[in-house]
């Protein structure tokens, strides 16, 4: 018997033995047991009477409470915490000093109310406020010099000590009535606790909290270099648990169904892991306080002056947070009702050719985990860390992104996603030169199932904002009523465009079931250097869905190949389009910035629009053209070859002076109302070749191929466009008035009512028409 087989058998024996111990509820040999540190895992709670100033609590039932246990008591301690100031103008928090005073909270608005006050600069300054995290804003009131208290809700009043503000600010605080304390004695039904209440209540509720005991168990396991076993139980925690510098530590629940960490009465992460070489977390369900139905209270708030303020900042919770741990495995862990990212990682990363950090994430694996009924993201790696894998996970009813990752070398594979936000790749809000030495956002998104629709983010899968080298393949979309896949070039000025991607082998069912069909596309590409190949896009029905577009390709991308795709029963099969920008700041008559993220802010290592043409627009009409000498990737300024009158807000489009290198070939388009719409500038190297276009079940079709730019049509087979008024080709004048001579060569036009539209004789006369076959 080989040594390898002996090792495999030994590993199997160890695994089976450990599994049997788990099932039996016994602690594996050599492991610590959280129960030995006082963790109760008890859901027991009881009604109680508390009196202001007293440390005695009279409970209805003493239950399983014991001396030394930490407990939390609702309606016992009215207080304000999490007092912060955000601004000016951007949501950067700092502790509140003496800007306002608060008083009077009586708990009538609930045991936990998050308040947000928005201050607007002016004469006089005014403020408005919300106590439901942005769902309802109460009207503006002036901040006066009077020494008065302003009532909010739940008894809370505020008084402004600062009356002059140098910009827009937000003031946040939470009103709470929870007393967190420790049992020091039990006498009959009376608990004597360490800390007094500050209010009277006959309806207080006493609950266990196991945070102190679980933290002691974790600290002991770290100190003794042992693993930690957590028996089945419902462990309420009043604060998050922290794992500092694990060196191979494993924390494992008895099983994921019955081992529950409940942070519904607190903020923070159930488990926070910091630094260290290696860590494993296995077999837990973690429960927070904010579900999918309150996703609007977790996302970006509609504030008037302070940008990037998210509701989750006011009342947040995570399942797991990881920072800079070298290798981590999170297995069979499940998040429910998390307000912020359910599974979150952030930390240091490599930067270009600079030396590696001494400590940073090099491998993070989520295996057989789930995020269900959560207000914000399912999984998020908010840095450029390496080798995150999300494998065999389930993401359902998630109000933010299913996955958001600026990180490198990510694998999002074999997952199931329904009614969740975007798998968002890139999202890198910076343009450092180091990112052109060592890029980021590299992903493999493969073998996943996406069902139904996308409640946040606009598309199921999107590569954007600096992401690069991405493969999106072999995914299945079921009854999909949202945009499916996007590879986006245009981005805001703080990012670089996405680039280098392959979209292949996806089966995309765009049938709307159980909801009204809405405008959507299966695949959209507006970044350069992208291949779209061998995808199947369809709608199930007796006729095409006019709301669906199969594949959209946007200019000014270059190096695009679209081949081998099958599109059926879509409103539009393949369509090309143009992005536009707007002039922002005018530097001089030849220099301007873009004030709208329509044209990609190109990378340093790119064409930088040298020699490209600008088409200036008024409405939809082109009023003139210019030549770009260069786009400066540092100042983000466009430089023109010749001066012209420039003004902020002017609309423009761009196109290359020579070839764009677009190849649309060997696709099958059947039963689509608008099979192929080429509504972009095109170029001498924009080629449509070898496609099969069949009218099939579609009616009211005007053209098989609508041509409005510089494209050659070679070797295509067009069939069945024989309705009255229909033609194989629809030819229209070039947008900037060029005299185009498209090559129309070797095509087969079968059973078509006409070759071209009736008013296209002049355009047809300039085309290079060779070797086409017309068939009945």
Image (spheres, rainbow, N blue to C red):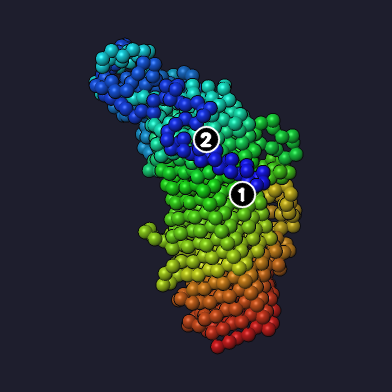
User: In the rendered view, would you say 716 is above or below 447?
Assistant: below
In the picture, the disc for residue 766 is: none
- Give the position of the C terminus as an image quadrant: bottom right
In the image, what residue occupies the spot 47% across and 30% down?
27
Quarter location, residue 246: top right
The answer to whether residue 471 shows anywhere in this view is yes
Neighbourhood count class around disc 1 (C-alpha, 10 Å): few under 14, some 14–19, many 20 upward: many
Q: Nearer the viewer, residue 24 or 126?
A: 24
Does residue 194 appear to the left or right of 724 in the view shown?
A: left
Where is residue 302 drawn, in percent x and y?
A: 45, 39
Where is residue 20 drawn, in percent x and y?
A: 46, 38
User: In the rendered view, would you say 627 is above or below 686?
Assistant: above
Task: Between label 2 and label 1, give the one nearer the viewer.
Answer: 2
Say what secondary structure mark 2 lies in. strand
**View extreme (front): residue:** 1
Q: Nearer the viewer, residue 724 or 387?
A: 387
Q: Are marks 2 and 1 in contact (CB under 8 Å)?
A: no
Does residue 6 appear to the left or right of 298 in the view shown?
A: right
Q: Tell which circle, 2 or 1, labels the residue nearer the N-terminal end.
A: 2
Where is residue 599 drawn, in percent x and y?
A: 63, 53
Q: Nearer the viewer, residue 380 or 30?
A: 30
Where is residue 258 drawn, in percent x and y?
A: 40, 36
In the image, what residue occupies the spot 72% across and 40% down?
352
Does residue 620 appear to the left or right of 713 in the view shown?
A: left
In the picture, the disc for residue 281 is: 2
User: In the rendered view, would you say 408 is above or below 224?
Assistant: below
State the CA–CA distance, disc 2 to disc 1. 24 Å
């Amino acid at each position: 018997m080989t040594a390898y087989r002996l090792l495999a058998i030994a590993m199997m024996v160890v695994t089976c033995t450990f599994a049997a111990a788990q099932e039996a509820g016994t602690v594996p040999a050599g492991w610590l047991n959280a129960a030995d540190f006082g963790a109760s895992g008890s859901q027991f709670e009881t009604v109680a009477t508390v009196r202001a100033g007293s440390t005695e609590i009279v409970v209805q039932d003493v239950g399983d409470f014991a001396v030394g246990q930490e407990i939390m008591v609702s309606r016992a301690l009215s207080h304000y915490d999490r007092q912060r100031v955000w601004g000016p103008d951007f949501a950067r928090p700092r502790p509140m000093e003496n800007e306002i005073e608060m008083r009077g909270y009586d708990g009538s608005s609930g045991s936990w109310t998050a308040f947000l006050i928005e201050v607007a600069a002016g004469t006089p300054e005014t403020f408005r406020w919300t106590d439901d995290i942005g769902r309802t804003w109460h009207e503006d009131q002036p901040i006066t010099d009077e020494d008065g208290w302003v009532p909010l809700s739940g008894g809370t009043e505020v008084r402004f000590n600062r009356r002059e503000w140098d910009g827009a600010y937000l003031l946040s605080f939470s009103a709470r009535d929870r007393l967190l304390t420790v049992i020091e004695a039990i006498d009959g039904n009376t608990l004597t606790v360490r800390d007094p209440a500050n209010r009277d209540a006959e309806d207080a509720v006493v609950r266990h909290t196991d945070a102190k005991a679980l933290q002691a168990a974790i600290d002991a396991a770290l100190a003794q270099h042992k693993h930690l076993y957590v028996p089945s139980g419902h462990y309420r925690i009043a604060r998050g648990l922290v794992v500092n510098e694990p060196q191979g530590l494993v924390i494992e629940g008895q099983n994921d169904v019955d081992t529950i960490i409940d942070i519904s009465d607190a903020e923070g992460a159930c488990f926070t892991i910091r630094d260290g070489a290696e860590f494993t977390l296995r077999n837990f369900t973690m429960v927070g306080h904010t579900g999918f139905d309150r996703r609007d209270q977790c996302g970006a708030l509609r504030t008037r002056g302070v940008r990037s303020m998210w509701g989750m900042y006011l009342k947040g919770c995570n399942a797991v947070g990881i920072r800079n741990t070298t290798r981590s495995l999170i297995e069979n862990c499940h998040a429910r009702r998390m307000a912020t990212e359910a599974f979150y990682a952030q930390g240091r990363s490599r930067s270009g050719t600079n030396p590696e950090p001494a400590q940073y994430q090099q491998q993070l694996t989520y295996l057989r985990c789930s995020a269900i009924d959560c207000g914000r993201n399912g999984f998020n790696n908010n840095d450029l860390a390496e080798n995150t894998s999300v494998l065999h996970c389930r993401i359902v009813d998630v109000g933010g992104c299913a996955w958001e990752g600026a990180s490198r070398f990510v694998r999002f594979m074999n997952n199931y996603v329904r009614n969740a936000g975007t798998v968002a790749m890139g999202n890198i809000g910076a343009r450092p030169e180091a990112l052109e030495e060592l890029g980021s956002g590299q992903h493999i998104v493969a073998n996943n199932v996406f069902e139904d629709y996308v409640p946040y983010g606009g598309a199921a899968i999107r590569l954007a904002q600096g992401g690069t080298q991405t493969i999106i393949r072999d995914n299945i979309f079921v009854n999909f009523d949202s945009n499916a896949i996007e590879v986006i070039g245009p981005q805001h000025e703080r990012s670089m465009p996405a680039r280098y991607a392959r979209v292949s082998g996806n089966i995309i069912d765009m049938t709307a079931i159980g909801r009204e069909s809405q405008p959507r596309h299966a695949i959209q590409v507006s970044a350069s250097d992208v291949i779209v190949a061998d995808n199947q896009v369809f709608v199930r029905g007796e006729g095409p869905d006019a709301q669906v577009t199969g594949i959209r390709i946007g200019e000014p991308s270059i190096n695009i190949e679209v081949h081998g795709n099958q599109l059926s029963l879509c409103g539009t099969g393949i369509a090309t389009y143009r992005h536009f920008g707007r002039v922002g700041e005018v530097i001089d008559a030849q220099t301007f910035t873009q004030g709208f993220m329509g044209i990609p802010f190109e990378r340093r290592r790119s064409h930088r629009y040298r020699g490209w043409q600008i088409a200036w627009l008024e409405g939809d009409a082109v009023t003139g053209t210019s030549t770009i000498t260069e786009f400066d990737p540092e100042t983000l300024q466009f430089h023109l070859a010749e001066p012209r009158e420039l003004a902020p807000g002017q609309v423009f489009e761009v196109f290359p002076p020579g070839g764009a290198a677009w190849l649309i070939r060997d696709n099958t388009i059947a039963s689509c109302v608008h099979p192929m719409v080429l509504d972009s500038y095109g170029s001498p190297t924009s080629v449509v070749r070898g496609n099969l276009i069949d009218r099939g079940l579609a009616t009211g079709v005007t053209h098989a191929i609508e041509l409005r730019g510089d494209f050659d049509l070679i070797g295509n087979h067009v069939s069945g466009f024989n309705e009255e008024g229909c033609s194989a080709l629809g030819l229209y004048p070039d947008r900037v008035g060029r005299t185009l001579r498209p090559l129309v060569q070797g095509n087969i036009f079968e059973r078509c009512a006409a070759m071209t539209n009736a008013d296209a004789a002049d355009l047809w006369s300039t085309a290079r028409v060779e070797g086409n076959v017309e068939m009945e």
